[in-house]
Image (spheres, grey):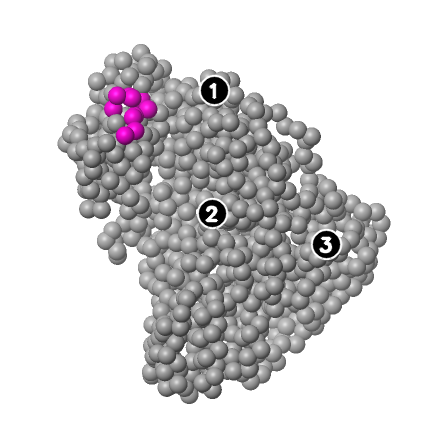
Amino acid sequence: MLQALTSLASCAIVLLHLFPQVQSVTPTNFTCTSTGGGSNTTYSAKITSLGCYSDNTTRTLSGKQINPGALNTPQYCADSCGILGYKYAGAEYGTQCFCGDAINPTGTKADNSSCNMNCPADPSAPCGGTWFMDLYEISNPEPNVVKNSFTPYCYTNPLCGNKACDKSLSISERIAALLSQMTLTEKIANTVDSASGVLRLGLPPYEWWSEALHGVASSPGVTFNTPNGSDFSYATSFPMPILMSAAFDDLLINKVASVVGKEARAFGNYGFAGFDFWTPNINPFRDPRWGRGLETPGEDAFHIQRYIYQLIPGLQWGASSLGDVNHKQVIATCKHYAAYDIEQGRNGNDYNPTQQDLGEYFLQPFKACVRDAKVGSIMCSYNAVDGIPSCASEYLLQTVLREHWGSSFTHDFNYVTSDCDAIGNIYDGHNFTDSYAAASAVALNAGTDLDCGTTYITLNESIANNWTTVETLDRSLTRLYNALFTIGAFDGESPYDALNWDDVSIGSAQTLAYEAAVEGMTLLKNDGLLPLKKSYKKVALIGPWANATTQMQGNYQGTAPYLKSPLEAFQSKFDSVTYELGTAINASNTTGFSNALSAAKSADLIVYLGGIDTSIEAEGLDRPSIVWPEFQLSLISELSKTGKPLAVVQFGAGQIDDTSLLSNKNVNALLWAGYPGQDGGYALLDVLTGAKSVAGRLPVTQYPASYADETSIFDLHMRPNGSYPGRTYKWYDGKPIFPFGYGLHYTNFAFSWASGPKKSYDIESLVKGYGSYNDASPWISVSVDVKNTGGKANMASDYVGLIFISTKNAGPKPYPNKSLVGYARAKDIPVHGSQKLTIQLALGALARANEDGDLVIYPGDYELTLDTDAKLTFKFSLTGKELAVDKLPPQAPHYSFTVPVHLQPPSTSA
């Protein structure tokens, strides 16, 4: 009958019979005010149709987006917008609703035939079309609404009089009461990212999709205020994770995450964002061609785990250690679970990693997120693993996530969201099911609680066909509403409610963004040109990154308070700076070469700033090769022939073969600068001039260009085998251009062990000595004395100590080249001064995966080394019987599906 209702205003009496009665209680410690600020709890928008309008990505209506799903009618959409104080409402694509205070000029009147989709709840009414909306003017929007201010749900009518807001009940009882009053259609409309809420109960819409990868970022749940400079019009924009991870500075990561979490919460408190943020991206950067490597901490699973241990507490609690899981600053989401790292054909790819590689590499970061860092949610990925799409995989979402990793993810407030449209892709990308309704059923049954998309709207059909149940749907909604309780959405009273605009982009945050860029920059070549001498007066700044601004932010970025380009920075330092583009990132001709060469010949110093950017590596865009763009390399070669001092700054995340730059003696220096964020220009200047020391280390391997011909991006095997060279520094059997962890300094160091392991350990005694054992249990700490012995630059410097372990006889063959097991960063060691680096090692440092994916400590001979070139070594042995410290559960012979499914073969190409 709901489909026959065309107006909430005309059916208020009917609704009382259609829906369960709201149970009125006297809530504890709540003051009831009306939704939106008025007093009418049965608000009905008065609307006038303006006809069909075009829409686009800039949006004809730029206010809140709501997804009523099967509830959508013009009146429902207008009620949803008007009660929030908006003057216009637009129904689009059948199920969507947009609100706004004005009609954007980019939206133009269109023929009514373009709005050709019927409303789900009233097929007689049009609800827009694809990129077209039926637009309505609202003559009676609720007055006195502060749109950009979050009010806890239980402080508004009519919800505050609902049993769901009775604080004398447990949270589970309150959520059960709320669900008992929702119709099936209303429940389904709240399982998608643009959740519709339930207007008649006073439950407001909520957008689950907010982003904050390296700062609060533009996304469906995040709005940056206008005009620029007004409150919440910008947020601190840190470097991309790939550059920050190159600092190998755990405290830095925690500080950055704490700032991002604080700013994100402030945005949420004032209605400019949600309270859950779909970050971080923790898929290892396995293949150098992957377009999204810039979003990650690099290729090493252990390094990513350490990154996670610092990032999640910072985001969720603004702290350096775990906080109260029932009270969070924001909810973080670790993505993309699991084995996702290819953009080509990502919506339908199937990967078959070995159980050994799955346990040792692909699952390790997620285990750290869930078991150790207590992350609030997980995002399942587009791809399939072993023939089953990740978002429909009971093995991944139940056996491993909710069972194997213990109680950490079985709380009612932990939820799983799909990647966007990944539920629909189960049917239309993987052909795993025969319909969208069947795809919805297998995903919900497997444990995917939230659909980023609209496919779950078909759950009515799924339930009608007995492919899933209302109880399973309620389980997911319970998790989602419990999650909102942890950030105070219902009751308020959160210790983070006081965060506001005064906490966004403050001086210390801006300083931290600069420091993060400085710490990650990595020196790859230097014949003595760097740090630059003060005697240089005339500088030629050349290349497609020389005047970069938004380019420095990478992707998943927001509006920054400012963007300081390299050109601006150099102009502030040198008497004469000439800028020439020279060539674009991926140019097809030499236009611009002559002007660049003319500028170079007139200068005392040439600084070329180039590499790659998000026009070459990005979400949805893998690289076909790992070489420098042809015309950039040609221009560098020509510049090197001028005989002028030449420094090359390489930007981007995916490494590109630097062989020709290393062999060219006229290229005097090479520095990698990633995506350095809002202060990238000044951070770069200070590193090049020696105002700041350089101590970054590559978080990835730089392979020779031939590597792309020797490996298929679709081959997930980590270990070498015959002509297959293996992956990452642990297994690659060729000669890298630069190894993982490589980085030069402006000064020299001397090293000595201050403490190390014993000569021998009995495995059983070692494990028993630490009580409840697992791979995260402590083993030992090692200490290294680091002395700055000076050099040509003769300056104080940071130093990153990397500890690797290796063996030639312990456990199954082949043996990894070495494995990173610990690191620490010493700060500002003065010339002729020393610092002691103490590095903690866990039992997992001793473990390797067997063919079943279990992490096992094996008897044998081992060696600890300092740094990539083994500046110090320490040998020891393990005796006794092998012992597993973490067992990966096997996949069941088969999992039961309630619908016909079609397992797909492994992908070999897009």
Sequence-earlier tag: 3 or 2: 2
Residue 73 visible to the viewer: yes
Q: Nearer the viewer, mark 3 or mark 2?
A: 3
Depicted 505 relative to depicted 157: above or below: below
| Picture disc at residue 735 | none
Residue that numbered label 1 is attached to:
463
Tag 2: amino acid: Thr
- Among the two numbered marks 2 and 1 on one chain, the one whose residue lies closer to the N terminus: 2
Q: Give the range drawn in magenta.
A: 116-125
861 left or right of 585 in image? right
Which residue is at 27% across, 30% downward? 116
Q: Quadrant of residue 197?
A: top left
Give the percent coordinates (x, y) of residue 711: 62, 56
Disc 1 packing (10 Å; few <14; some 14–19; many ≥20): some
Q: Is mark 3 on a helix, strand or loop?
A: loop
Say what amino acid the circle numbered 3 marks.
Answer: Asn
Q: Within 10 Å of the Cα at label 2, are there few (<14), some (14-19), or many (20+) other Cα atoms? A: many
In this view, the residue in front, 67 or 267, is 67
